[in-house]
Amino acid sequence: MAEFYRKKKKICQMCAGKSVDYKDEMIMNKYVSSDRKKILPRRSTGACKKHQAHIANEIKKARFMAILPFVK
């Protein structure tokens, strides 16, 4: 009989106390796909709904300020 296991739930990093700022390129690259530079979904980042919206806004700010590219 197959045993099933529960996948550990991802914890939102912003709820844990870490911050995301549009000026920090290294942190912003974690939330953007490597090949097409698209914003990763919540299921991939593990962020809650409120903080995923914040991440998206910060990425858009960084793109506008030419810190992150729109496409590769």
Image (cartoon, grey):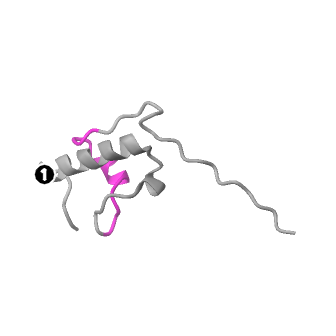
Residue 52: percent from the left, percent from the top? 36, 46
Provide the secondary structure element on which disc 1 rests: helix
Q: Residue at x 28, y 63 (%)?
A: 37
Of residues 32 and 7, the one nearer the viewer is 7
Q: Where is the C terminus found, in terms of image quarters?
A: bottom left
The answer to whether residue 45 is above or below residue 3 is above
Q: Is residue 13 left or right of residue 64?
A: right
Q: Residue at x 37, y 52 (%)?
A: 30
The answer to whether residue 57 is above or below residue 7 is above
Q: Is residue 38 left or right of residue 16?
A: left
Please identify the quarter of the rendering in which residue 4 is found.
Answer: bottom right
Residue 7: percent from the left, percent from the top? 65, 54
Main secondary structure type of the part rendered in magenta: loop
Q: Residues within 10 Å of mark 1 (few under 14, many from 20)?
A: few
* Residue bounds of the magenta highlight: 21-35
Please identify the quarter of the rendering in which residue 5 is found.
Answer: bottom right
Q: Residue at x 48, y 49 (%)?
A: 46
Residue 62: percent from the left, percent from the top? 19, 48
Q: What residue would you read off at disc 1?
A: 64
Q: Is residue 16 left or right of residue 36?
A: right
Of residues 38 and 28, the one nearer the viewer is 38
Residue lying furthest top in this view?
17
Instruction: Tell me the amino acid under the disc marked 1.
Output: Phe
Residue lying furthest front in this view?
49
